[in-house]
Amino acid sequence: MIKMGSTQVKKKKISLLFVCLGNICRSPAAEGIMKKIVEKNDLQDVIEVDSAGTSGWHEGELPDERMHAHGEKRKYDFCSYARKFRKSDFDKFDYVIVMDKNNYNSVKALADSPEQIGKIHLMTEFSLQYGYYDEIPDPYYGNSSDFELVLDLLEDACVGLLQSIKNHYSLI
Ligand code: 4NP
């Protein structure tokens, strides 16, 4: 059972959906990083994590091999299959966390209510050390330092995201 403030109680897990364009670089990396942080904090029974893309261009594919290789150097195994974001994700997830402003606009266009719009957050809202970045830059046409930067930004923002969730839900 998850306490929210003094009175409300949430019975379902807190659910996070990371969203980028292709769901093969940034959002599966965010998913893998966040899952590891959740496990380290022994919160697997409290927080669940998934990812999706605003496009269906890479549906069914494993993460981009460059993203996978850069993740492996940091002991991650990014291994989720790409899927497209769907309207029903607004009902299923508490947080819809997008990587850039294009993703924000694509997801917002599918929202039906202010409550759904309120679930959308830019990943960089949670940045701690890298507060001067206002989005997670798309590395797809970039080089290896672009992929490393994505991982630096995501690791930092995932720590900030967990802090923010802990504050909001009064988790230990
Ligand atoms: P992602 O990166 O949105 O971080 O998964 C991209 C993946 C594929 C493409 C663009 C960005 N693409 O043009 O196919």
Image (cartoon, rainbow, N blue to C red):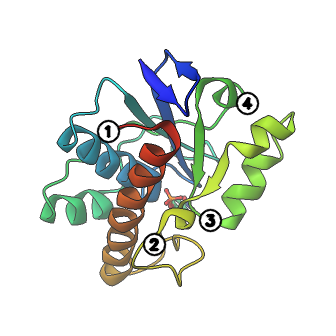
**Where does residue 137 sit, x and y in percent of width and height?**
52, 74
| Residue with the mark numbered 1 | 172
User: In whole angstroms, how far apart are the C-alphas of marks 4 and 2?
Assistant: 26 Å
Question: Is tag 3's residue or tag 1's residue first in the polypeptide sequence?
Answer: 3
Q: Please tell me which residue lies in front, 143 or 170.
A: 170
The type of residue carrying mark 4 is Lys
Q: Nearer the viewer, mark 4 or mark 1?
A: 1
Residue 87 position by quadrant: top right
> Within 10 angstroms of label 2, few (less than 14), some, or many (20 or more) residues?
some
User: In whole angstroms, how far apart are the C-alphas of marks 3 and 1?
Assistant: 31 Å
Question: Is tag 3's residue or tag 2's residue first in the polypeptide sequence?
Answer: 3
| Residue with the mark numbered 4 | 87
Question: Is tag 4's residue or tag 2's residue first in the polypeptide sequence?
Answer: 4
Q: Nearer the viewer, mark 3 or mark 1?
A: 1
The type of residue carrying mark 3 is Asp
**Where does residue 114 sit, x and y in percent of width and height?**
85, 40
| Residue with the mark numbered 2 | 139
Question: Is tag 3's residue or tag 4's residue first in the polypeptide sequence?
Answer: 4
User: In whole angstroms, how far apart are the C-alphas of marks 3 and 4?
Assistant: 19 Å
Q: Nearer the viewer, mark 2 or mark 1?
A: 1
> Within 10 angstroms of label 1, few (less than 14), some, or many (20 or more) residues?
few
The type of residue carrying mark 2 is Pro
